[in-house]
Amino acid sequence: MIATTRRFRLLVLVLVTLALAPGLAGFWAARAATGSSPFGEGDLAPAPLREGNGGEDAGAVAPAPPVVRLASGPPPGFLVIGHMGAPNEEVENTIPSFQKALDLGANAIETDLCLTKDGVVVHWHDWSPNDLIAKFRQLGQQGLKYRPYNPNLLSKWRRKVCQLTLAELRKHYGYTRRGNPLGTSSRSATPINTLAEVAAWARQEPRLQKIFLDVKIPKDGERFVAPLMRSALAILRRNGLEEKTIFMVANENIARLVQAALAGSSAGLTFDRELVPGIIIHPGKFSAVKNALALQVPYASVGKPVATLLGWTIYRRIVANDLQALAAHNARRPAVPLRGYFPWTIDDPTEMKTLIEMGVHGIITNHPERLHALVAQEP
C-alpha cells in the first residue's frame, strides 16, 4: 500500500512538472532577459542590447525557424493576422507595429482595447497593472522587442486604466526595451495610441482586410462595456471600418453585453476560448465553436495553451473537432453560419502549416512574416 501511494505521488509530481514546465521556462527566460533574479535584484546583469536586432540579447543567435511547405493551399480569404501588429519588430499595439505587420505580409491585425477615466478608447493590453498576466508581461516576453513600462509597485499612479485619464496613462505608462533592467527610466518615444488615431491610419490602408479588437474589460467591469462600445462603434463608422471589424471577448457576461451593443451593427464578434494551464482531461469542453453557437455569433477563436501538459497535441485535437462541428453546423444552412475560425497565438511554422492544412480561416501570430511566407507559396 505504501509503495503504491509513493508511486502515485511520483506520478502526480511528474505530471504537474510536465504541465508547468513550459510556463516556468518562459518565466525563467523572462527573468533572465530582464536581468533580475527570484533570489534578489542584481544577481543577473542584463546584457547590452544592439539596435535593430529584434530585442534579443546582444550576441545571441536566435534559431532559424524550420523550413516547411504546405501540402495544400489555405482557403480563399485566409487572414494573416498580426498579433498586436508585429511586436517582435516594433512597440506592440501601436501604429508603427500595425504598419510593420502589413509590410511583413499581414492582411489583418489584432489589437487590445481599454477605456480611460475620461472615456477615451486606447490600445493597451493590461486593464490593471497588478493582474498576474500583466506582471509577467512587465518582466518581458521572450522574442518581443519591448515590454510594458509601468509605475513602480508603490506609485500612486499604478492603477487600472479606467482610473487614469489619457494624459495620465501616457505620462506614466508606455514601453521600454525588453533587455532594460526593472526600474529603468528609459522609455520608447512611441506613444500609446487611441482607437481614433488607429482608425484614421487604418482607413487609408487598402491592404488591411480585417481588424480584430480584443476588449480587455474584466468580468467585474460590466459598467464600462456600454461607453467603450458606444465610442468604438462611432469611431469605426466615421472611418468606414465597421464591416472590417471583429470584436473579441474572453468572458461570457462581457461578451453578451458587447453583443447587445452590436445590435444592428455590421461588425462581428467572437466569444474567445482560452485553454486553462495544467492538465486538460476533456478537450471537448474547450470548444470555441460551442462558444460561438451559444451566443449565435459568426466567428470562433481559440488560444493555444502555454503551460498545459501535451499542449499542442490537445490543442490540435480541439481545433480538429471544432472544424468538424463548424462544417456540420454550416451544412444545416443555419440562420447564423460560422464564417471564420481563428487560432492564436501561433508562431511556429510547423504548427502554422498543420493548422492551415486543417482548414482554419486565419491565424493570429507574432510573426506575420513566417505565416505570409507559408501562404504565399506556389501550390
Image: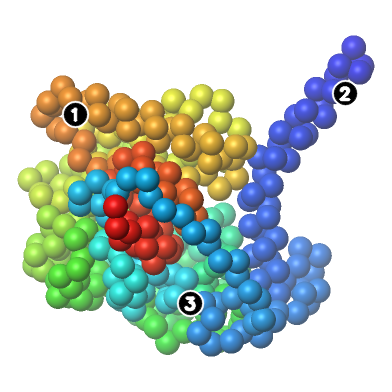
- The residue indicated by pointer 1 is 330
Which residue is at 81% across, 65% downward?
39
Whole-angstrom CA distance, mark 3 to mark 1, is 44 Å
Task: Check disc 3 and report its element: helix, strand or loop.
Answer: strand
As drawn, is 230 to the left or to the right of 120?
left
Q: Is residue 208 above or below residue 55?
A: above
* Res 196 visible: no
Amino acid type, mark 1:
Asn
Q: Nearer the viewer, mark 3 or mark 1?
A: 1
| Residue furthest to the front | 379
Task: Check disc 1 and report its element: helix, strand or loop.
Answer: helix
Whole-angstrom CA distance, mark 2 to mark 3, is 49 Å
* Badge 3 density bin: few <14, some 14–19, many ≥20, Cα 10 Å: many
Q: Nearer the viewer, mark 2 or mark 1?
A: 1
* Res 262 visible: yes
- The residue indicated by pointer 3 is 175
Going from N to C along the chain, the mark reached first, 3 or 1, is 3
Tell me the quarter of the image containing the N terminus.
Answer: top right
Amino acid type, mark 3:
Tyr
As drawn, is 10 to the left or to the right of 369?
right
User: Between residues 133 and 97, which one lies in front from this camera angle?
Assistant: 97
Residue 219 place in picture, x, y as percent: 39, 44
User: Between residues 278 and 227, which one lies in front from this camera angle?
Assistant: 278
Which residue is at 19% across, 68% downward?
207
Whole-angstrom CA distance, mark 2 to mark 1, is 51 Å
